[in-house]
Amino acid sequence: EPEVTQTPSHQVTQMGQEVILRCVPISNHLYFYWYRQILGQKVEFLVSFYNNEISEKSEIFDDQFSVERPDGSNFTLKIRSTKLEDSAMYFCASSINRQPQHFGDGTRLSIL
Amino acid sequence: DQQVKQNSPSLSVQEGRISILNCDYTNSMFDYFLWYKKYPAEGPTFLISISSIKDKNEDGRFTVFLNKSAKHLSLHIVPSQPGDSAVYFCAAQIQGAQKLVFGQGTRLTINP
């Protein structure tokens, strides 16, 4: 069964550094998403991407965040200058239509 | 953000019996609801969904019930199996929007 793959599984970064999280969505999917889950909290929506542009974003997704689909297969989330509070599990998801969204196994981001 | 609530953090059920997981929501604009299952170190896996035009949807051992007047949905698993032990999230989506709003999750343990 096709799946969403995310790399790396764990990323450790110094505060203030830039980090790029990578995702390969399911190949025939058209909608792409990033969510995050801070330890002990709910899964929170960050951004959705469709037709090569951001279609929806949350208040969390500020100027420090950006997304890109650099080629036909990858979907990336960049955090420009990481803060301690960016430490979380970051999940990528994709879908053919609005739903259902299929999730990857996540990248654990640890900011030191 | 308390729009989607799962009030039971945990539930323990005997193998072979019925598991009932509950979810309440406050936003009457939600028109689509999903249940996800999550194992440790994995991403959420889509289980079953229901549109607000229905009150029941069934897929094998899994049935989701929606009570719009009470703003309540439930997931029934019957019979429960040890492999069902996981964290279950309900999620909701507003018509026309792409983001999913998640509940806090309920940890289900199936005892042999």
Image (tube, rainbow, N blue to C red):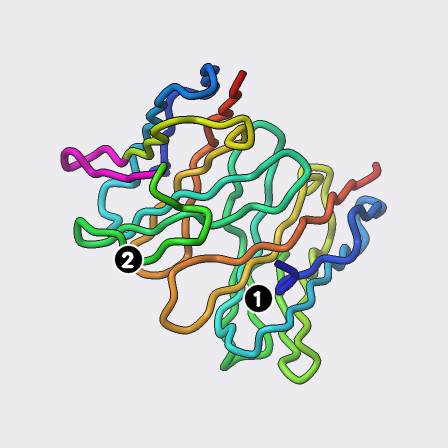
Q: Could you say which is closer to the camera, residue B88 or residue B6?
A: B6
* Residue B10 pos. (x, y %): 80, 46
* Residue A20 pos. (x, y %): 33, 25
Point out the stretch of residues depicted in magenta: A65-75
Mark sitting on residue B105: none
Residue B43 vertical position relative to residue A98 in the rendered view, above or below: above
Residue at the extreme bottom of the image, as rendered: B69
Q: Quickly name the residue at label 1.
A: B58
The quadrant holding residue B37 is top right
Specify the quadrant that holds the C terminus of chain A: top right
Judged by depth in the image, the label closer to the viewer, 2 or 1, is 2
Q: Quickly name the residue at label 2.
A: A55
Left or right for A83, reference A81: right
Q: Amino acid at mark 2?
A: Ser
Q: Amino acid at mark 1?
A: Glu
Q: Could you say which is closer to the camera, residue A18 or residue B90?
A: A18
Q: Residues within 10 Å of mark 1 (few under 14, many from 20)?
A: some
Residue A4 lies in magenta, yes or no? Answer: no
Specify the quadrant that holds the N terminus of chain A: top left
Left or right for A17, reference B15: left
- SS at mark 2 in the image: strand
* Residue B82 pos. (x, y %): 73, 38
Q: Chain of mark 1?
A: B
* Residue A36 pos. (x, y %): 50, 40
Left or right for A78, reference B79: left
Residue A73 lies in magenta, yes or no? Answer: yes
- SS at mark 1 in the image: strand
